[in-house]
């Protein structure tokens, strides 16, 4: 990885976020081996993080858009488990607000995982981050 770090949050709808990612990657000439896409995932338990170097969209519309617009699934992605509130429908749950304590904890753990990736690279970090979920 280079010594530069860009954080980008698309302001488009999630299912169109691939357009913003593609334009960002092209403008800054980012090598896809250095790209990390971070997404929430209600199919993963709350506070669980899963790092993968490539793969399918797993039903996530944001990832589906990124894969489509980059024309590849060969980029790292960090899925952030937000669990699912069984009383809400998918859209309502994902677009809803997380309570303050959970929000702070998931941000803290996410930042910790990003530091792990920066310090160890993607491959080594996969075993570190993905192992945490077994505890």
Image (spheres, rainbow, N blue to C red):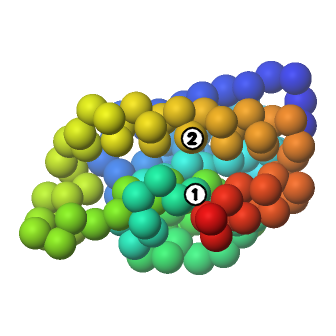
For the residues labelled 1 and 2, the Cα–Cα distance comes to: 8 Å
- Number of dots carrying numbers: 2
Q: Is residue 51 visible?
A: no
Give the residue drawn at x 67%, y 27%: 6
Give the residue drawn at x 52%, y 59%: 48
Q: Is residue 46 visible?
A: yes
Could you tell which of marks 1 and 2 lies nearer the N-terminus? 1
In the picture, the quarter occupied by the C terminus is bottom right
Asked if 54 appears above or below 48 in the picture, the reply is: below
Asked if 77 appears above or below 103 in the picture, the reply is: below
Q: Tell me if 25 is positioned left or right of 121 in this view.
A: left
Splitting the image into 4 quarters, where does residue 1 fall? top right
Q: Nearer the viewer, residue 128 or 118?
A: 128
Residue at mark 1 = 49
Mark 1 burial class by Cα count in 10 Å: few <14, some 14-19, many 20+: many
Give the residue drawn at x 53%, y 33%: 108
Residue 92, labelled with which disc? none
Residue at mark 2 = 110
SS type, badge 2? helix
Instruction: Confirm or deny contact between disc 1 and disc 2 (CB under 8 A).
Output: yes
Splitting the image into 4 quarters, where does residue 127 fall? bottom right
Give the residue drawn at x 72%, y 46%: 35
Direction front: furthest residue: 135
Asked if 81 appears above or below 118 in the picture, the reply is: below
Mark 2 burial class by Cα count in 10 Å: few <14, some 14-19, many 20+: some
Q: Position of residue 8 (x, y in %)?
A: 54, 31
Q: Position of residue 112 (x, y in %)?
A: 65, 36
Direction left: furthest residue: 87
SS type, badge 1? strand
């Amino acid at each position: 990885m280079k010594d530069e770090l860009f954080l980008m949050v698309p302001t488009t709808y999630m299912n169109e976020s691939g357009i913003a990612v593609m334009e960002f990657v092209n403008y800054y000439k980012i090598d896809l081996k250095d790209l990390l896409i971070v997404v929430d995932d209600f199919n993963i338990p709350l506070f669980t993080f899963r790092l993968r170097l490539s793969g399918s969209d797993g039903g996530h519309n944001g990832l589906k858009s990124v894969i489509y617009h980059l024309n590849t699934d060969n980029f790292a992605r960090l899925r952030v488990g937000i669990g699912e509130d069984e009383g809400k429908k998918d859209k309502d749950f994902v677009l809803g607000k997380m309570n303050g304590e959970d929000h702070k904890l998931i941000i803290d753990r996410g930042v910790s995982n990003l530091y792990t990736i920066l310090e160890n690279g993607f491959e080594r970090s996969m075993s570190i981050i993905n192992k945490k979920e077994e505890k």
